[in-house]
Image (tube, grey):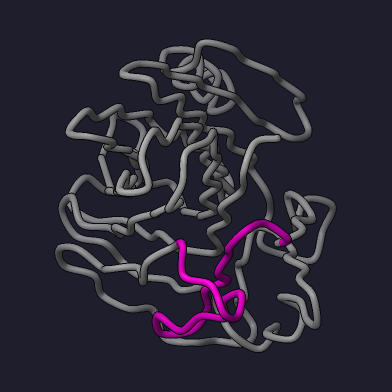
Amino acid sequence: MSVLAIGLVASFAHSSELVVDLNDLSSVTEVESHGLTLMSEFHGYELDEGRYRYANDVDLDGLDWSFWYGEHQHIAKPEVSYISNVRETGNLEKVKNDTTKNAIGNRYYWDGGSSLDYSDQLADSAIIHGNGGYEFTVTPGKEGEFVVELYTHNWLSSSDVTACLKNQCTTVQNDISFHMTSVKNTIRFQSESPDDQLTVTYSRSPRQFDFEQDKGYHALEAIQFMEVR
């Protein structure tokens, strides 16, 4: 079986919907339970300045957002704090900056700046050992329907994203491609009280086709919080 065929089988096993372009492997997975809807969308892209260098252009224009780079540094929307600081969990071996290997998956734009201003920096990258990763909370402070977008990338290393609201949790698996993989996780939820708080956990979760089972390369790129109108 070819590498591409193996990739398609692996993706189909985890995905409720599969969209395939032989030049740009991608898939979409959606999971819904406990009033939470989680979506995982991945795109494979090449590390060089070729056709698939960036997966998407993303506008950070929501109620709150943060862009992550370097050694856990970030730029955030001023004067708001719906999104907490991101906590690193488990054993993360930080990847040192190398201007020749800026592997960011998307280009990000916000009022007054863009990720291109940080093109000499890596995304917030690490070799994650075991099931380590990242965790943060989102507090809308009012009733309504909201969406959180989490942007990451990896190299041949799978992960899970879990969202918890009022002690009810839902998990979606993030597939991998056979290039660098840009992943967008979307979490849709309903806040019924100003005290409601959503907890989001991104954790490395090794599966059959990962390059290594005990560790893997992952990077945090951006988080965005929006209200559904």
Residue pictured at 62% horizontal, 58% vertical = 63
Q: Image check: 153 left or right of 36?
A: right
Residue 226 pos. (x, y %):
61, 48
Residue visible at 30% across and 59% down? 134
Q: Is residue 76 left or right of residue 210?
A: right
Residue 129: name its quadrant.
bottom left
- Give yes or no for residue 99 being in the magenta stretch: no
The residue drawn where x is 62% and y is 43% is: 227
Question: Compared with residue 1, is residue 69 higher up or lower down, i.e. above or below?
Answer: below
Camera-side residue of 202 and 147: 147
The quarter of the picture where residue 217 lies is bottom left
Report the span colored magenta: 61-82
Query: Nearest the camera: 11 or 161?
Result: 161
- Left or right, 83 with reference to 58: left
Q: Percent position (x, y) of residue 173?
A: 38, 30
Work out whether residue 110 or residue 126 is closer to the camera in this orientation and state it.
110
| 7 or 129: nearer the viewer | 129
